[in-house]
Image (spheres, grey):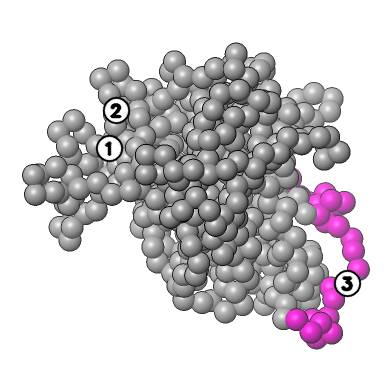
């Protein structure tokens, strides 16, 4: 049976429809016996794009295609193309199924690093009446958002039904905690009759409700570039879900100095699939009118982010870290000489700040892939589930990371530290991610300096592989980003 999606928290008894298993455990604990407050409702975690393992079940034993350990992940982007080719989407191929939520660090060109969801799950279990209240919705992120939303609606109903039976609370609600694309699935539930009837609070972490310019860069660049971005472009062009992430805000800076929204023809010109683009744009028009009730946003800020694109005469798409403001009449603000007034584009390194819709939100100076992992984000999730707070803002500095996508072993590159006034007062650490913790890890502690008015840390990494860059010292959780270092011969 093909499992388009399932809840994987219950590992023993198979439930109908391929949506999960039920674990037989002791009765639900009595919250009255516990001093700390607990949530009596169910919670469902919905990951972002590439946040669910994908498994090839065609052989005698399942083979993991996505969610690989760092060593195999590096080989997928830099070595043999076999695993990479299997990830391409074919609607007639029923051999790939979603697995568990991401449990190891992952990396994808343009989208950068993805941190595992294990910490978020562990933190949530501390505030619920019983660990079985926590469900995990794994889905095939290659599929369209609206299709996965239909599967999510079924998962919500099944998980809440189980929890009401286990807890003896027929009035229990279910809360949704969604990262990145997962929030788009939650919004699409509003198109399904009755799907949100029993949902209490929805918390989204870094969800691009108006899309991300990086998705267009991914579809339209990579030609003549190193192997990882070239392969990512080939993969992205086949994925319906990737087209659902295309920007819906004015982001295309034209040759005549105008800023306008993308069209289907723009996507096709850049090498995208016309049918997939047309379907995604039609869905976006419908979903733009949907609002999530009791919705709280956690958004990443202070990170240099691609907000604007250009398409050159060779149909190559380039991303730019600037944006423009629009006046009350919807016209872009211009300088006295008539040219567009550009501003630094900031967000979470992948999603522009304005794309998340700035209503009832909390800000965290953090990269996109780590938003579901940092303490401040979880504190806001916990507070929201208990109290439904209004918008607040974190105190402390706002450090940001700016790191090139293409890094070769043995070649110097710069780690840019935005928000830093001086070259001291923070610490940078680079640690190699290995498959076995007992293996030796390459660790670097670079020194920052000022170059051309910027605070940067020049770095040279000699060993290819996956690394985590961390910068700490702003009074909030360290800002983290995963990078892939390729062998010089691969570039």
Segment tinted magenta in the rendering = 10-36
Answer left or right for 187 relative to 31. left
C-alpha distance separating marks 2 and 1: 8 Å
Say which label, 2 or 1, has the lower sequence index: 1
Helix, strand or loop at label 2? It is: strand
- Tell me whether the residue at label 2 lies in contact with that at label 1, contact meaning CB atoms closer than 8 angstroms: yes
Determine the residue located farthest toward the top in the rendered image: 489
Give the number of the mark in front: 1 or 3.
Answer: 1
- Look at the image and tell me whether residue 99 can be seen: yes
Determine the residue positioned at 30% across, 42% down. 251
* Local crowd size for mark 3, using a 10 Å CA cut-off: few (<14), some (14–19), many (≥20): few
Counting from the top left corner in percent of width and height, residue 346 is at 39, 50
Determine the residue positioned at 66% across, 33% down. 466
In the rendered image, the quadrant that contains the C terminus is: top right
Closer to the camera in the image, 414 or 44: 414
- Tell me whether the residue at label 1 lies in contact with that at label 3, contact meaning CB atoms closer than 8 angstroms: no
Reply above or below: 179 against 133: above
Closer to the camera in the image, 275 or 303: 303
Q: Any mark on residue 27, and which?
A: 3
Is 17 contained in the magenta span?
yes
On the image, numbered disc 2 is attached to which residue? Answer: 311
Counting from the top left corner in percent of width and height, residue 381 is at 60, 67
């Amino acid at each position: 049976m093909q499992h388009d999606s399932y809840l994987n928290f219950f590992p023993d008894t198979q439930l109908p429809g391929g949506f999960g298993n039920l674990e037989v455990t002791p009765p639900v604990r009595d919250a009255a016996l516990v001093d700390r407050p607990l949530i009596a409702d169910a919670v469902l975690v919905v990951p972002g794009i590439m946040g669910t393992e994908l498994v090839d079940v065609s052989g005698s034993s399942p083979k993991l295609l996505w969610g690989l350990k760092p060593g195999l992940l590096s080989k997928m982007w830099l070595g043999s193309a076999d695993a990479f080719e299997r990830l391409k989407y074919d609607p007639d191929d029923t051999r790939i199924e979603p697995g568990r939520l991401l449990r190891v660090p992952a990396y994808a060109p343009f989208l950068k690093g993805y941190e595992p969801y294990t910490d978020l799950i562990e933190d949530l279990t501390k505030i619920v009446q019983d660990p079985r209240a926590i469900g995990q919705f794994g889905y095939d992120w290659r599929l369209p958002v609206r299709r996965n939303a239909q599967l999510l609606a079924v998962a919500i109903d099944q998980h809440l039904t189980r929890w009401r039976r286990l807890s003896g609370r027929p009035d229990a609600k279910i809360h949704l905690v969604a990262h990145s694309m997962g929030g788009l699935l939650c919004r699409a539930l509003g198109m399904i009759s009755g799907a949100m009837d029993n949902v209490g609070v929805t918390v989204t972490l870094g969800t691009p409700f108006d899309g991300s310019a990086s998705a267009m860069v991914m579809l339209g660049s990579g030609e003549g570039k190193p192997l990882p971005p070239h392969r990512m472009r080939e993969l992205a062009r086949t994925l319906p879900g990737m087209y659902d992430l295309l920007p819906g805000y004015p982001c295309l800076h034209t040759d005549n100095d105008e800023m306008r929204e993308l069209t289907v023809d723009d996507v096709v010109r850049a090498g995208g699939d016309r049918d997939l683009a047309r379907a995604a744009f039609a869905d976006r028009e419908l979903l733009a009118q949907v609002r999530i009730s009791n919705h709280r946003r956690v958004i990443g800020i202070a990170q240099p982010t691609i907000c604007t694109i250009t398409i050159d005469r060779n149909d190559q798409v380039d991303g730019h870290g600037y944006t423009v403001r629009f006046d009350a009449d919807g016209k872009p603000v211009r300088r006295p000489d008539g040219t567009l007034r550009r501003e630094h584009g900031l967000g979470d390194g992948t999603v522009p700040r304005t794309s998340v819709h700035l209503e009832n939100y909390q800000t965290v100076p953090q990269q996109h892939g780590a938003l579901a992992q940092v303490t401040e984000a979880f504190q806001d999730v916990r507070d929201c589930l208990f109290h439904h707070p209004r918008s607040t803002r974190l105190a402390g500095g706002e450090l940001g990371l700016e790191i090139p996508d293409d890094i070769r072993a043995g070649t110097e590159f710069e780690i840019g530290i935005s928000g830093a006034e001086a070259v001291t007062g923070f610490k940078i650490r680079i640690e190699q991610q290995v498959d076995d913790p007992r293996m030796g890890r390459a660790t670097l502690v670079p020194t920052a300096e000022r170059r051309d008015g910027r605070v940067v840390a020049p770095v040279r990494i000699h060993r290819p592989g996956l690394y985590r860059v961390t910068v700490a010292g702003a009074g909030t959780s360290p800002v983290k980003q995963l990078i892939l270092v390729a062998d010089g011969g691969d570039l």
